[in-house]
Structure formats: structure tokens, C-alpha cells
Amino acid sequence: MKRIHKLGLGLLILASLGALVYANRIYVLEYSLGWYTDIRHPRGPYQEVPWVQGPLTEATPLAKRPPNIIVIMADDLGINDVSTHGGGHTSEGVPTPHIDSIARDGVRFDQGYAGSAVCTVSRAALMTGRYPWRFGVEFTPTPGAMARVAGELYSDPKRVHPVMIDKVAAKDAKDFNDLGMPDTEITMAEALKAQGYHTMHVGKWHLGSTKEMRPNNQGFDETVFMESGLYLPQKDARVVNSKQDFDPIDKFLWPNMRFGVSYNNGKWFEPNKYLTDYFTDEAVNAIKRNKNQPFFLFLAHWGVHTPLQASKEDYDALAHIPDHRRRVYAAMVRSVDRSVGRVLKTLKDEGIDDNTMVVFMSDNGAPGYIGIPDVNQPYRGWKLTFFEGGIRVPYVAKWPAHIKAGTQYQQPISNIDIMPTVVAAAGGKMATDRPIDGVNLLPFLSANPTAQAQRPLFWRDGPYRAMRHKNWKLISSEIPAKDWLFNLSTDPTEQVNLAMREPAKLAELKAELQAHHANMPPPRWASFIKMSVNIDKTLDQLDGPGDEYTYWSN
């Protein structure tokens, strides 16, 4: 009897625990990714990165070597965050003089486009010179834990347009680490390594985290890899946080992100300072170690992506900004610009500035879900939309030996153009066994430039697609079933939809859009979340029944 009594009591306790877990299932699932990370990847203390020491002396004089190449990519930085493209945060005392100096000493691409309105797809375009849907990279990887709670996190009765969750696809979703760019692609790093470059990556990757898809197997000799997404631990005295309670993504990030990096696939460890400054330290160290040989450095910042965290030093320097969220965000912009300045200063201090090509861009436009309305002005739309605010980004480059200072380039260019350009600068050639969508921009930027031929640019996210050809821009959506047609020469901020007034032009572009996407392979992984994005309002503003919107698949 005692044994039966104990068994019954045990079952009662288990049932009670089960009921408690079920009652708090959203809380448990919302925190599950962070708990899983802590178990699987315990983080060690800070350790110095043992960058490989390059030649101590020059084997070949600098002027006779191919140029060093540095590509700096910011994350979610809006075009209006950079003062060379507009007002930026200059009126708040936060200009971007170092990013601006690249344009002053080189070229400003006035119609520079991201490869997509979201990070993974844009980065795949940059790394390959190809439209990523040619190799099945169409959506940004989403953690399965987020899929399991997305419906509840987004279940706001105030939302006019509900979030759509494909529960079957979510249940069958691959592990987050398995989602990325296949190693059959030829990356920028692989092409430059073939030309004798020492290749290095610092920061965000987001192109897959299996051994096959990580940077070391995609052409990079060395990588300091961002393993999670905190700039500092939340309670660290050196950080100031801004949480957006109106944003379900933000609610998911805070409990699940961790502060950790790795070197060359080693164990996770915690950096010794605010993440943007830490990545900059490592970029500077990498440059110094390799100044006597051709090198390629991909510095992929996490700034200014959410969660919004500023270093206390930057935050304290902006005490004149009264709004806490704007102050944190402006401080983050300040840190990214300071990083660019430190990289440029290192090049000068080491005497290699003249023969180094530096390219700076953002992976997509700034999001509406941070609740700061002017980040993409004067353009409409946000990250996750194909309106100009989602894909028109800060884009500047310099190479004193080739690009004339103060150049303002007016033709549309995109991430797909950077790989052909840097490979040509290195004396290499692009592969001929696959379609290459980008073009080498160097002939158009020389002292005696040739004219760039007009060509269409395309963007894709499932059935949501867009293209630009000459001055015409088409955005085609399945949800809602709608086409937007704009003449950017007379309407650069996309205010007047000409789809009904210009049926012949609409039909022409729709046929061209359909022809481009015909016979493309299926996505490497399915989308299981479709969420609406208000084109003209930030997420903290209530949708109105007459507001324009699109749906983004992920």
C-alpha cells in the first residue's frame, strides 16, 4: 500500500508539474532557445584571438601588390542614419564623419541597393555576386523556438492584419544552424584566396552554422564569429538597454540572446567590451598582422540591429537627446561610425591606405519595429519591404589608386556587384560555370570612366517580388494581391502608384519579372511565418484600415 501511495503521490506531482509547465508554456518556449544555448555552448572567459602573423617585411612593394580589400557591412542601418546621404542624426549631434569620409575620398553610390530587404539573403548576394534564389536562399533563418511561440507573441487583437503561421512547416523546420548558403557556391573569400589573399572575417555571418557553411569552409582563413546577439550582458554596468514592449521579435531576443563569440570554430568565449568596439579591435589587429601581404577583411557588424543596446560611454555622450530609445539608437550609430574611423586610421598609420579598397554598406534598410520613424527618410517602407526604405541603403567606397575622390555615382548598383568588382581589382576572374548577376564597377569609376549599361535589378521573398529597370520600379505582392508601379525619375519616394494608369508598362515589367524567376530552384527551406508590415507606420503605431501594407514571408 505504501508503494502504491508513493506512486500515486509521484504521479500527482508529475501531473501538477505538467499542468504548471502547460499553463506557462509560452514563457517556457519563449526562453527555450537561451536555455538550450547555455547547456550546449557554455561561454568561457575572454581570450585573445591568435591571429596568424603575416610576413614581417614586404616581399613585394606595396605599389606592385593587388589592393587590400575591406568590406564593412552594418546591420539594419537606415540610409538616413548616415549624414552623407541626408540629415541623419546630425541635428541631434550624431553625424557620421568617418563613413562620410569614404564618400569624400572615393565614391558615394546615390542609388545603392541591398541584395534584399533582410539580412541572410542580402549577405548571400554580397558573398557570391549572384541572386541568392538561384541557389535556394530566399528566406532568413528563423529559430524553431521562435516559430513555436510566434503565433502567441503576435496575437494582438489590435492588429488589423494577422500573422499567419504554417504550423506543419514550423514543426518540420530544420535546425537553425542548418539553414544557410550551400558550400557549392563560390564566395568572395574563395575567389580572393585563389589570388593569394589572406582572408579574414569578423562579426556576423548568418549564412549557416554547420561546419560546411561556416566561414572557414567558405574561403576564410580566419574568423571571429558572432555566436549570438547581445552587445554586452543585459545587467553589465557598461551597457544601456532599450526594450520595445510593442515588438514581439524584441520580446523574443532579450531572453534568448547571449554574449559570445568564437575563433575558427573553437569554444565560445565572452568578448572583453561592447561588441561593436570588440569587433573593431579585432579588425585592427587583423590589419596590423597582415599589412605586408594582400588581405581581404570582411567586417560584419551587428550594429545597429536589435536588441537596442548602447555602450554607456556613447549613451552618456548624448545626454542632450531626451528620448531614451532614440538616444540608445543614436549611440549605436555613433559606435559604428567610430569603428569605421578606427579602421581607416589604422590603414593610414600602417602606410597601406592608398592601396586598400574599402567598401561600406548596410545589409538592408532600417526596420519599422524599432519605433523610430525617420531612419529611412525620405523613402517609404522598412526592412522587410521592397519599398525604397527597405532596400535603398548607405553605400560608399574608396580606393585612392583608382577611384576619383568625390565621385557621386548615379546608376543603380547592388550587393551583387561587389564581388565582381573586388575580384577584378585583385586580378582575378569570375566563374564561368554559373550565371553571375553582378557587374564589375571599376570601369565606371576610373579617371576615364565608361558608361554602365542599363540592366534590371531584382528582389524576391516567396511570392513577394520586385524589380527596377531604368527608372521604373515594380513591386508585386500576393498578400495583398496588388501591384505597385513607380516612375522613380519623377517620384523617387514612391508616392504615386501608376499601376492603373500605365497598364502597358505594368504588363511589360510583370512579364520581365516572371521571365527572371522562371525555372528557379525551390527554396532550401520553407517559410512558415507570414507577417504584415505597414509601409508608412512604425510598429508602435496602430494600423488603420486604409493603410498600405505588405506581407513578408520568413
Image (cartoon, rainbow, N blue to C red):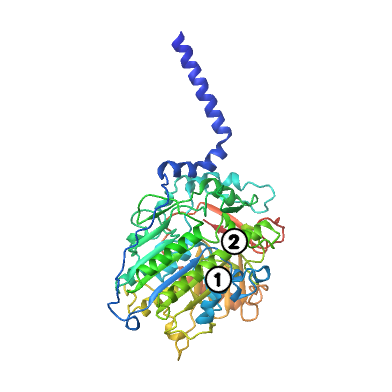
Dot 1 falls on a residue whose secondary structure is loop
* Residue wearing tag 2: 314
Q: Residues within 10 Å of mark 1 (few under 14, many from 20)?
A: many
Q: Earlier in the sequence, mark 1 or mark 2?
A: 2
Q: Nearer the viewer, residue 301 or 62?
A: 62
Q: Residue furthest left?
A: 59
Residue 311 in picture, x, y percent from top left: 57, 57
* Residue wearing tag 1: 393
Residue 326 in picture, x, y percent from top left: 65, 60
Residue at x 49% of width, y 52% of height: 142
Residue at x 34% of width, y 54% of height: 211
> Which amino acid, mark 2?
Asp
Q: Nearer the viewer, residue 85 or 63?
A: 63
Q: Residues within 10 Å of mark 2 (few under 14, many from 20)?
A: many
> Which amino acid, mark 1?
Val
Query: In the displayed structure, would residue 229 be above or below residue 412?
Result: above
Dot 2 falls on a residue whose secondary structure is helix
Tell me whether circle 1 and circle 2 mark residues in contact (CB < 8 Å).
no
Tell me the tag on residue 327.
Answer: none
Residue 132 in picture, x, y percent from top left: 43, 65
Q: Is residue 23 visible?
A: yes
